[in-house]
Amino acid sequence: MDPLGRACRGSLALLLCLVPTAAWATASTEVAASVGPADSLAATDPAEGSGLAPSSQPAWNPPAPQAEAQPWEQALRLPGRILSLPLYAIGKGARSGLLVVETTSLVPRTRAFLAHLPRVGVYVTPASLGDRTGLGGALELRPAFLGRRLGAEFSGSTRNYGRVHVDLTAGPLTVDFLSEWRPEDQFFGLGPDSREEDRSEYAAQQTRARASLAYPPARAKGRPPRAQVSTWIGQRELATRGGRGRNPSFEERFPSLGADLLDRVSHHLNYGWSGYVDLRRGRPHWTHGLRAEAGVERFDRLEGRALAVWPSPRPGAQFTRYRAAIATGFSFMRDPRTIRLSARATHQEVSGGTPMQLADLSTLGGSRGLRGFEPGRFHDLDLLVGEIAYVFPLAQHVELEVHGELGNVYGDVLEDPTWRSLRTSYGVQLRPRTPLAPLGMLGVDWSRETVRLRYSIGGVE
Amino acid sequence: MSALRAALAAAVTLAGLLVPPPGGKVAAAPTSPEETEISYYYDVLEHSVLRPAARQLDPSRWVRRLAGNPREAMNVDEADQVRLPSTWWRPRAGHHPVSVEQMLRGPGPGTGPAPGRWTVTRAKTQGVTPGFFIKDARGDRFIVKFDPPGYPEMATGADVVSSYLFWAAGYNVPDNCIVHFRAESLEIAPDAVATDELGRKAPMTPAFLERLLGRVRAEPDGSYRAVASRLLAGRPLGPFEYRGRRRDDPEDRIPHQHRRELRGLWTLCAWTGHADSRGPNSLDVWVSENGRSFVRHHLIDFGSCLGSGAVAKRSYQTGHEYFVDWGVMARSALTLGLVPARWEASEDPELPSIGFIDSKTFDPVRWRPDYPNPAFDERTARDVRWGARIVAGMTDGLIRAAVERGRYRDPRAAEYLARVLIERRDKIVQAWLAPAAANAARTP
């Protein structure tokens, strides 16, 4: 061994000898102090012979109050105590604050208030406006005196995303109206090889009215049916505007696309059908079974016949969208460890010559798939994405999901995919849970381009 | 070397200045200490997150571990027994023979409120299980609590059975009793106050009482089963904490986490599955007896003992991990959850009046409450053995008599609970008091 290494080893050994010796010496004195009869006020129990009732004699005590720690312990703790003084102050504040919360019954009051709202038909929930939309909330009104057949939802977020949705349901028939404003969705270019440095933004403005028929009908605020088929017809207007965020607007980054799409308004007659069967089961998360979903919808161009809110001299593309998704899984052991597999594909056939609106393109990145990439990172007509996930318990109230995703967007999903074109993304999610369901998640996803922190309150399966 | 010695001496001197001087301010006259309050939320936050983090970062704790020299309880004598008298505990089972009759008379008469009409003085519908305060025909005061929906007899049975067991173990507990009553036997005191679900207080009305009883399960004959807990005599001072001292109590000179009675309570809690053993479930009372006024320390509210979780049955993980268990989480993450947890071998008796408690997966060495308790965290093998001696003193007769007081209608429930308690007792004795175990240098 070299001299330096020998010296280090010697010092470490000396330290290891000294510290326990000091601790032992101090501890020995404190034991002696605590068991020595000299310091006791009363070494025996005068009430000893008087039965088993609690004693009312003066309690045995040392002559003076005892410190919680020995001086040498206090000395060792001193640096930590000084460093943690701000935390100590925060703790004191939290303690007083929480005591006020309790004495004023704030939590039961809030809980009772929130529980009362649905009874009259008012729901306050986090908004589901998608990734990168800021903090958002939703207010839904579904009056109980109307049998919850009429509902209106208003969603908004700190990044100025907004949505209004009104629906009227009678058995299997639903008529609904939707108006949505998305001011800063991301766009990085078309195709599987778009570049991260081409980040830009666009705004999408959509208005839609439609009638749909579903069987079996879903109950308002109830569990969705295990299987359902639905069909619909309606009119939709979609406009692409310049991005309102901090990044360049898409027409600056992609001038030719901007010339075609900026302020273009598409009027479509939209109709189609979709169906799903959901045989997934299990608690606290779904542990086994299968969900399969398929749908076809057609977007026919409306020219001149449209009930246009925003008239447009340039009609948009007309196209048919096919989509399919499947998810399955199995689990093992008592507190379920679950392996899940899922795949999803979208194929769109354009029958008109004009370019499609950006919001009509298939998109990957963020919560739409390939979560380790920026939201809206990939845009094209079609997409293909698969995922494998493993969910396992960490403790009574927490479980962890690790997952990997593989996929990309394509001009034609039936022709273009190659193994080398696929992008990969990985992630972990910490999911607080009750015995019945996960409550939300806090996770991190990463890809070769970026690392993204994600969270959700509710909405976790 | 001398510089090092000087620095060490300076540090120790500085630390000494920061330590409260021994024999500092101690009230001379026996005046009642101030009433205290503990924030339930903060208690969970502190003991689940803040204190465990501080403990891990405490160098003195690591030095003690390295030296294999834990800090022992401060109030023990040469025989390693609690110095007496104590206002916390009194030697009973394990130290003296305790007969069934003594145990059943111990906490109080155990007869519940006197027959006749009960006058309701205060009530609340807040929380999952409602309850009210009554004054009986003799003028004795009780708090009346019910079972949670879906679990008849569970919380009330646990409250009564555990109060007897903890009394036999030596602790101060309230006098709890199962009662059955009819709505007609209640009358509302003129000045009765009701607290509703929103925490609002208002004069109590018959409609309020009807609504309250509408939230609890009625027996087929229209009566209601509840636990009547006799209010402790004296002036309530609020809960005690499992660390630090009540500084305005001249008899409270030993930091609670260094008291043998509280450290050794771990063994009793492990035995009875009292995972809810925390500060808020305790009560200090200023009592005057035999010409002397002093603070007596009580354990209260055993509705979350045995298999009862108060609002539902206990989870299978109870006793195996804390609500927030960093160690279990780290272990599971490193093994991807592929190593099965001990609790996963448990078998549910499917007895609603018991909830869930078992002996098969019970671990008498590594049992844990719902969240860390400062006194339990400081326990040493000597503290646990002290408690094990008490548990060993719980005879089958005492256990069966206490269980019988739970008034379980299903004989399978009473039999199961008694058997589980006996088997858990035997496991504790085997682990801590058997000759081989006693000689082993165990660290909990």
Image: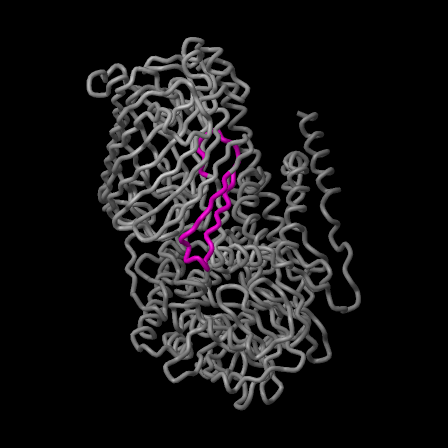
Rendered image quadrant of residue A330: top left
Q: Quadrant of residue B171?
A: bottom right
Task: Give left or right: position of B187 versus B347.
Answer: right
- Rendered position, B47 above or below A177: below
Residue A117 position in % (x across, y down): 51, 55
Tell me if A339 is positioned left or right of B406 in this view: left
Q: Point out the stretch of residues depicted in magenta.
A: A128-155
Along the line of sight, which residue is nearer the eye, A233 or A376?
A233
At horizontal 30% and vertical 27% (from top left) the residue drawn is A300
Farthest residue, direction left:
A415
Percent of width and height locating residue A4 = 51, 15
Quadrant for residue B331, please give it. top left
In the image shown, does A312 or A274 lie closer to the viewer?
A: A312
Q: Is residue A173 magenta?
A: no
Whether B426 is drawn above or below A154: the answer is: below
x then y, percent, for residue B188: 60, 82
